[in-house]
Image: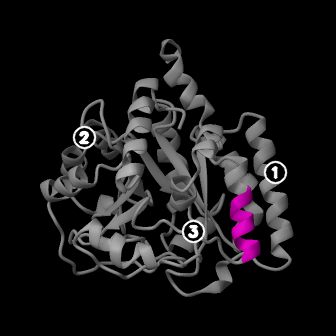
Amino acid sequence: MPNISGRMAARMLARGIRNRFQNKPLSVSFEITHACTANCWHCNWGGPIKEERLGAEEYAAICEELRPVVSHASGGEPLARGDVYEIVDAMTHEGGLPWMIVVTNSSNLTPERFFKLKESGMHQLSTSLDFPDERHDEFRRIPGLFDRMSKVIPDIASRTEKDDVLLNVCITAWNYKDLGDMVRVAKDWGVPINFSVYTHLRVQDRSGLVEGDGLEGLAQSIEEVIDLRNRGYPVYTSPRVLWKFHRFLTEGGIPGCEAGRKFLVINPDGRLTPCAMVMAYFDRQEDMLEHFTKQNTCEACYISTRANTEKSFKEFLQDNTETLGKMLMPWRN
């Protein structure tokens, strides 16, 4: 992540190494609400939901116990909670960890809300993009969303630090031909872009998986994205991870999932689940490791969180040369 200072990179590396030996997660997603302003094709949440929710200090206590390197305030749509600022503030520490990312669909995003989140301790805002045009509105079922994003995101990007806003794309059978154009949108808006890959587990719909002849087209799109990256376009995802997405779709899965150990999810009511696609609930990570992770044989997803938390140390070094350079030569920050 280019907007991480050398000092922060050193802290993240140290905590990551410690967590690896102590079976603590690298990444924890706090789904602070399952209610959402969208009703996306590929998601099991959408609309208002009656649910039990914890308060800011209760989420902070869970975060303090798990000590993740990276924490996400997500949903559902986290900006649907009026106390999202208090939640972010309670979980973050000035100059310290966790690295806090707020994940939004941007339907409620304004510059004022963005800067209030920054003041609360947010390090980065991640917003989804499914198409490089108005097809995004239909996919999210929010009329006018793409037009709104095309105004508010460049506005925010022009008024904040580099890479404080990130576009996140889930590669599907519906959009794999548009990956290059979405990279160009990111450049036009002045923000970087990250890729993940679709899984059918949320909605049990395999039509979103790139299969058959589409895999050749996906390979061409990946080559285009890598070429743009090499030419200086702001693509976070490394070529190695992009090709591993292709391998996941070609082989129909990747074994060795570390859900519950390397990453996990906190539900609005504070219960833990190994990942967003598994409806198994635990009160303690230790119970999750014993009764889920040890027996886990699932290989049906390879989302960005899994791809990035399950890297070997060598892969981590290869994919983070810029950030590690800042850590070794802090005077360049």
Give the left or right position of residue 164, taking residue 76 as reference. right
CA gap between label 1 and label 2 equals: 38 Å
Q: Is residue 159 above or below residue 278?
A: above
The crowding category of the residue bearing disc 1, from other C-alpha atoms within 10 Å (few below 14, some 14 to 19, many at least 20), is: some
* Callout 1 amino acid: Glu
Disc 3 designates what residue? Answer: 256
Q: Position of residue 280 (x, y in %)?
A: 35, 81
Please report whichever mark, 3 or 1, sits nearer to the chain's N-terminal start: 1
* Callout 3 amino acid: Gly
Q: Position of residue 261 (x, y in %)?
A: 41, 62
CA gap between label 2 and label 3 equals: 36 Å
Please report whichever mark, 2 or 3, sits nearer to the chain's N-terminal start: 2
Give the left or right position of residue 274, taking residue 120 as reference. right
Q: Which residue does the image show at 25% across and 48% down from the upper left?
A: 88
The reply to whether the magenta stretch includes residue 290 is no
| Circle 2: element type | helix
Q: Which residues are magenta?
A: 243-251
Q: Is residue 38 above or below residue 105?
A: below
Disc 1 designates what residue? Answer: 224
Disc 2 designates what residue? Answer: 120
Please report whichever mark, 1 or 2, sits nearer to the chain's N-terminal start: 2
Q: Which residue does the image show at 18% across and 75% down from the upper left?
A: 52
